[in-house]
Amino acid sequence: MVAAKGALEVIAPAERAAAERAARYADDGHRVLALAGGEYADLARAQEAARGELQSMRKVIADLARADITIVNADGAVARAERAFEEGRYGDVADELTETREMAHGLALGLGAAARDLVGTAEREVEDTRGAGIDPGRAAMVLVNAHEAIEDGRYVEAIEYKKVIEDILNDARRGRTNRALRDKLAELHAKIEAHSKLGADMRIPQEIWEKAEGRVSQGTSAEMASYVKELSESIDIAAKAHMDGLVGSLGPLIEEGEELGLPSEGLQASRQEAAEAAAAGNLESVYRIKGDLQERVLEAKQQSLQRRSLEEVQTLEDQFVQSERLGIPVEAARSKLDEARRAIEAGDLPRLQNRGASAKEALDGSRNPHLVNRHESRMHTVYAMIANAKRLGAEIGESESSLAQAEDAIRKNDLAMADILIKQAEVSIGMQIANFIKNRYPNLALHLPTTGLQANAWNRYVFEVENKGKLPARNVAFEFEGDAEVKGATPITELGVGERKLVEVGLKPTAAGELPLTVDVAYQRMFDENRYELKDRQSVKVEPQGTYLVEDVFLIHSDGRLICHESRQFREEIDEDIFSGMLTVVQDFIRDSYKRSKTTLKRLQFGDSTILIERSPHTFLATVLVGEDPKLLTLYMAQVLQEVETRYGEILEKWTGLLHQLEGIDELVK
């Protein structure tokens, strides 16, 4: 200032005034700068405090959020505080956060108490785990970290440590459980192998064990306890079933022992003892009891075998006698039978059995082919009776089963059993058939035509025979009485119940007029050799020999297919070639002639016969006649075709060739 004043003294007055103002301004600037420096330091401190307040509150909110705790309106308060901070209102930051801070403080106190309780619980769990003989591992170190977090106020972190401790302890417990389960699996597998060696069916337990072992190998312990439980139960079930089976297997042994004459009381006592041992799970005792029973039965069987061998030798003696009567050579077998007798005298059972078996084998070798042929012949007869009985609806009893067993016995060369079974089948089917045919008989009826014959010509005479009875008729034969020649009366092998058959014969009456015709029928009842007879008499009108004779009529479709054929003339098999030739001539004539001309009536010669052909829109009617042409025949043919078209025209237009579509058309032609 002194230097400034000195300078003013040498400056002009106007400049002096300016200089004074500048000096004054300089003093004011120093004072302003000094004041601004102090305020800026206070402002910086306020800003830093506000920033710390915001950061602290954000951390508290974040810590509480980690524990799933939310402060109501905390986000709004923080937002308002951040806005105040950005606007430089640092003193308002703490005010905006006051309520949230108080609520956070209260929650932090509660969180701290909860963290202490949870860490205390974790500490007790660590001690309990250690007391159970399980190494807690890293859980102890994590527990120390949890205590330090509580001391530092890091409560959420302490709670998270508690969760980590629980996971570690659970892993330790599971590890021990899994080891125990694996040990149990090994123990159960040893039981499976032990029971299997004793004959138990352990397939299901083995499958369960393999599944469990596979999960263990894959590091999967889930559901292991259920696998162990299921496996243990399955082993117990299989073992019980095995022991029950062993006890059950004693039944046939006991029955065999009783059949061999062993005391029933002792055998039943062994069964009861075995059942009690099985109930107690004592498998060794069950096997011991079974072994004792087997020895007793074996001894009784040997004694029975000796008796049976003696009986077989006697049976062989009888068979030798029978075979010699039948002329079957037995010399080779007799020497072996003599050796068997000597073994009896010496008391040598093995040699007796050996020589007896050799004698039987030699005798069977001679007898069997003869017996097999006899048995098969008898079986064939019985099978035929069974087939007929079945066809008629009769019960066959057990005869079919007996025959099947007889066939099996023959295959096994057990001819004695085969003979017994065949006799059973014969008796059974015989009784069933006798009961079935009782009061059942065939009842034949004849339906004889009364017209259609011409004198001195071979006429086709067709009549119907019907069985109205309750049994089929066999071997139905026909004989004719009357003033006419007869040929072609073929017997009927079988006429079933309700069956009708047409019989065609050739009749040649010697004169016109009424012909008294008698038909004698002889037949047998099914399963019965007796013969039954039927006689039917009918008067047949015989026309005199005229100027013409219609022998055959053909109805042929417009495309050449034969629809039906009716014949008056009786033809034997030798005439079939003539008939086929006649049909071919008619078909060829129709095909060629009607292509050239559209006239209706056509005629042609076939040997001594004349063939008249009349047509309609869908058919041709060909009439084969011998003699003079009757004038009215063509009119009658046209009338027949008109009736055919009226009744069957629509069907014939689209005819597929199936005759059942034209049912009744043959009656119009006839």
Image (tube, rainbow, N blue to C red):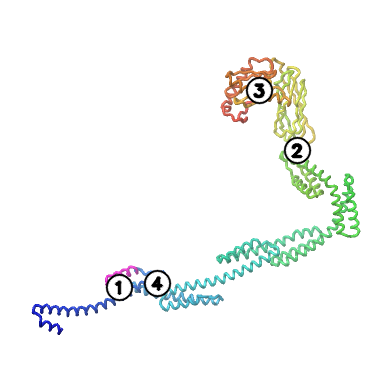
Query: In the image, is residue 414 part of the stretch drawn in magenta?
Result: no
Question: Magenta region, mostly helix, strand or loop?
Answer: helix
| Residues at discs 4 and 3 in contact (Cβ within 8 Å) | no
Q: Is residue 207 above or below residue 35?
A: above
Identity of the residue furthest to the front in this view: 10
List x then y, in percent, for residue 359. Answer: 87, 52
Residue interval drawn in magenta: 74-89
Q: Earlier in the sequence, mark 4 or mark 3?
A: 4
Type of amino acid at the residue the image marks with label 1? Val
Residue beneath disc 2? 437
Q: Residues within 10 Å of mark 3 (few under 14, many from 20)?
A: some
Q: Earlier in the sequence, mark 1 or mark 4?
A: 4
Identity of the residue furthest to the left in this view: 13
* In the displayed structure image, the side of residue 602 where residue 309 appears, left or right: right
| Residues at discs 4 and 2 in contact (Cβ within 8 Å) | no
Q: Earlier in the sequence, mark 3 or mark 1?
A: 1
Numbered label attached to residue 585 = 3
Residue beneath disc 1? 93
Q: Earlier in the sequence, mark 4 or mark 2?
A: 4
Type of amino acid at the residue the image marks with label 3? Val
List x then y, in percent, for residue 296. Answer: 80, 63
Mark 1 or mark 2: which is in front?
1
Residue beneath disc 4? 63
Q: Earlier in the sequence, mark 1 or mark 2?
A: 1
Q: Residues within 10 Å of mark 4 (few under 14, many from 20)?
A: some
> For numbered disc 3, what is the local secondary structure?
helix
Mark 3 or mark 2: which is in front?
3
Residue 165 in view: yes
Type of amino acid at the residue the image marks with label 2? Ile
> For numbered disc 2, what is the local secondary structure?
helix
